[in-house]
Image (tube, rainbow, N blue to C red):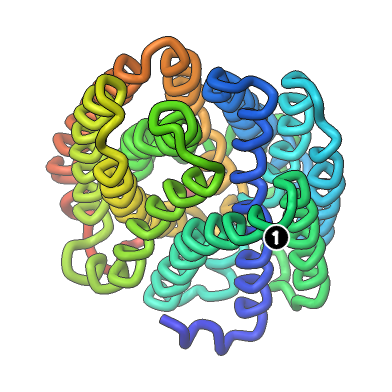
Amino acid sequence: MLQVLRNATYAKLFSAQVIALLGTGLLTVALGLLAFEIAGDAAGAVLGTALTIKMVANTAVAPLIAAVVDRLPKKAVLITADLLRLTIALMLPFVTEAWQIYLLVFVLQSASATFTPAFQSLIPSVLPEPDQYTRALSLSRLAYDLEALLSPTIAAALLTVISYNNLFVGTAIGFACSALLVLFSRLPAQGEGGPVLTWWQRLPLGVKVFARTPTLRFLMLTNIVVAAGTAIVLVNSVVYARGVFGLGEEALALTLACYGIGSLIVALSIPWLVGKLGVIRTMVTGATVIVVGLVVAVVVTVVSTASGDGWFVLLGTWVLLGMGTSLVNTPSSRLLADASTPANRNLVYTAQFALSHACFLITYPIAGWLGAANLTSAAIALLIIASAAGAVAVVFARTRLLRAADAPTMTADQDR
């Protein structure tokens, strides 16, 4: 897996990703604690609203900006987005009202909605060989998982000596280092294939590829399952840790770390699993694991809200949900790379970014607003959503088209 780091360009881009992720992890912990300070036991509702706004930015802004910057130099786009994120991170410690959180999160996520698809679409050009790309995906997932594990751990250690507001400074440092690494990277030349399209023609292009590609329609179903499993973790972890179990600030970091541990356990074996099972069956397995994790989450929620017991079972449930998420998300980019060409790749990745985050527009409000009224009802609703989407995905995965496509090395549809 580590041999892909011999590519100097990918090594710098990967380092930029890791450092930015570390800063983002500190932001996640600090934002949860900031919401609890402002809203108390209603922190889930505040955080749910903030994350819903984040998803609105991802869904609405990403395609618009991608169509604008698609022909611009990728390096300039990435650095500008990083600098904007740095600025917003430095403003967050001064927030005193919930509406200020909402505004800054929208701007910050609009920058991330520009950075992430552009960054991801570069990797197939840097590592065009399928096996190398799969290893890079696993390494990228490993970075996400280590961030989910290490960031809360670092945050918990820092919280013993500093105020949580200072964690936002760590976030800013991460974005600054990311911008510097991108600046000193030699990025591949942008493809000029195909006719020059207008902004209005580029805007819907990625979604059109999704609509006519069976593997990407399957990916959309698994996006829904992942959104349900992720929402209960990101929105309600602070409510479980601080409100239900009455634990300290470090408990929130521990719950998020457990989610990262679960994902980390799986990420290391993804190249082997994809080689044995294929991309589709690996993702189906992950969707199934998420549904099982949500079943356990419902049981834990019922028990814990009634008796206050079940803390360690909750941590184990978060591990399970992390495992399922990694099984779905890590190999999913193979489907995107195989369904796109260099000319439209950034727009296809942006479509996935927007469509996957659109799913959170449903699950985050359920986890936050419904959870603020009744945690058990929120857990059950998320389970129903994940089960329905997962069942359709399993049926769809058994169709002839997807069975034919599910191989260790898939053939790209060139008619894009």
Q: Is residue 392 visible?
A: no
Task: Report which residue position mark 1 lands on.
Answer: 192
Please tell me in which quadrant of the rendered image residue 398 appears: top left
Q: How many marks?
A: 1
Residue drawn at point x = 45 percent, y = 32 percent: 246
Q: Residue 234 appears at what percent x and percent y?
A: 48, 37
The residue at the point 31 percent across, 65 percent down is 265
Residue at 57% across, 53% down: 345
Which residue sits at x=49%, y=33%?
Answer: 242
Residue farthest to the top, as pictured: 373
Q: Bin the neighbour count of mark 1 within 10 Å (Cα to Cα): few under 14, some 14-19, many 20 and up.
A: few
Image location (x, y in percent) of residue 273: 23, 67
Instruction: State left or right for residue 288 relative to residue 157.
Output: left
114 relative to 407, above or below:
above
- Please tell me which residue lies in front, 297 or 70: 297
In the displayed structure, 15 sits above or below 398; it is below
The amino acid type, in three-letter code, at marker 1 is Glu
The quadrant in which the N terminus is found is: bottom left
Position of residue 239 measured from the top left corner of the image (x, y, whole percent): 47, 29
The one nearer the camera, 369 or 41, is 41
